[in-house]
Amino acid sequence: MARLNREDRNFTGSLPDLKASVKATEHQTKVIDRKIFIVETHFPKVAAMLQRYAVGTAKLRNKGDELAKTITAYAEEESPSLKQGLTTMSECLSAIQDQRDTEVSKIEEKLVQGLSVYDTKCKQARNDVRVSSSLSTREVKSFENLEKAQMKSTDRTRIARAQAEFQKASGEANRSLRVLREQMNEFESQKMRDVKQIFSEFVVCEMELLARSMELYTRAYQGLMNISEKEDLEEFNKTMTFKPTQWGSAPALSNAGRFLKAGNGVDNVLEEFCQWKKEGCSDYHDVPCNFTSIATQNLAKTKMDPETLVVSFDPATANSLGDIDKEIVQLALKQAEKTLQELGVRVSQGYKLGYELGYIKGVLEHVLKTVPESEDKEAYMNGYVNGYLQGMLHSFKQGELQRGYSDNNRH
């Protein structure tokens, strides 16, 4: 007897031929089952490992952010050149963590999810296989009933009914098998496309991270190589230099008078001020000009407000001084202004770089008013003024204050 043709709905072949055809269908079903089993077994594992990979990358990202913050905090306490290099490194390290964060998001939202949907797809495919298998089994049973009716019954109606049931079962089985093949072809095609896309995106993520990291680490390396040890050591040595901020705190300077003309040191200034006080001068405009001190002569020339006296430092009367950084000048001026203001002496706006003799006036008046009669007022005055001028001269010497102010610049 001819082999069973599954497309022939009026098939009247033998049961063995039908069973052989069903076995072929079962083989195909096993192959499909195997493919589904592979996906069901390995896709969840791959998705879980990708998720763990994302978690590990996220932890590395967090540690990188913490390291960047720690380096930034350290850089804030360092010298300028080292601070700049460390700041550049910290910024680059932080940018790399941003790239890692992008990779983590892509793995979790696209790659892991792309694999996770196959749990539902596999369940649907297995359901389709079960339906197709049940229809094939039903086809075999209906054919057995048809053969029994043909062999044992002479009732043509019963035979016709059995044959109709078989044809119906055979048609449903054929359609189910055809649909199953189409579905599995689509399942396999989609699976391969998804696997290709998922892992290619993963590789692209890694390449982007690697390329971005290479770029940023190169920039960080260049920033570190640009750290100037010489500049930072110079800055360190400057900070090591002691600059007194209170009267008398500077070390004694044996050459304190070298910034003034000979014979016009601290003692001479004090002597002239004491003489000025004894003669009853009440206004700076009344200061006599017959003293030898250049400081006193300048005092008379200024014709300043009685509450403020500023005599600018004249480089022509001092040894040559080197140029200094403007920031150091500003700091020295601010400190001098603060010291004077603490004593209640009003400093004129825009005053030039120089000795603040107005401070001496303030000290004299303060000491004369507050020191008990039993004390040596002149000794107090000498100590205050000498300490202040020594501190100023010490700052001038350490900073090598600028030599650019002449009489035309004075107030």
Image (cartoon, grey):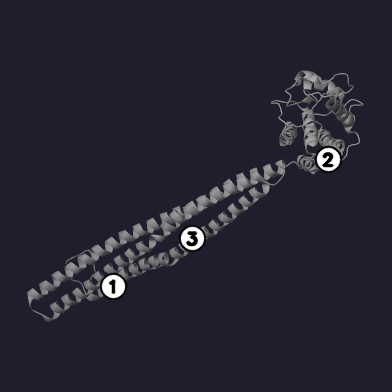
Whole-percent x and y of residue 402?
Answer: 79, 28
Look at 74% across and 24% down and name the residue there.
306
Task: Give the position of the C terminus as an image quadrant.
Answer: top right
Q: Nearer the viewer, residue 217 or 238?
A: 238
Mark 3 or 2: in front is 2
Q: Count of labels shown?
A: 3
Which callout, 3 or 2, points at the residue further toward the start of the chain? 3
Q: Nearer the viewer, residue 170 or 403?
A: 403
Q: Which mark is residue 20?
A: 1
Whole-percent x and y of residue 25?
Answer: 30, 68
Mark 3 and mark 2: Cα distance apart in space: 67 Å
Q: Is residue 111 left or right of residue 260?
A: left
Which callout, 1 or 3, points at the residue further toward the start of the chain? 1
Q: Give yes or no for contact between labels 3 and 2 (Cβ–Cβ under 8 Å).
A: no
Classed neighbour count for the residue bearing mark 3: other residues with Cα under 10 Å, few (<14), some (14–19), many (≥20):
some
Q: Which mark is residue 250?
A: 2
Look at 14% across and 80% down and name the residue there.
151
- Residue at the bottom extreme, as displayed: 152
Observer able to see residue 320:
no
Q: Amino acid at mark 1?
A: Ala
Mark 1 and mark 3: Cα distance apart in space: 47 Å
Q: Which mark is residue 51?
A: 3
Which callout, 1 or 2, points at the residue further toward the start of the chain? 1
Q: Is residue 325 left or right of residue 128?
A: right
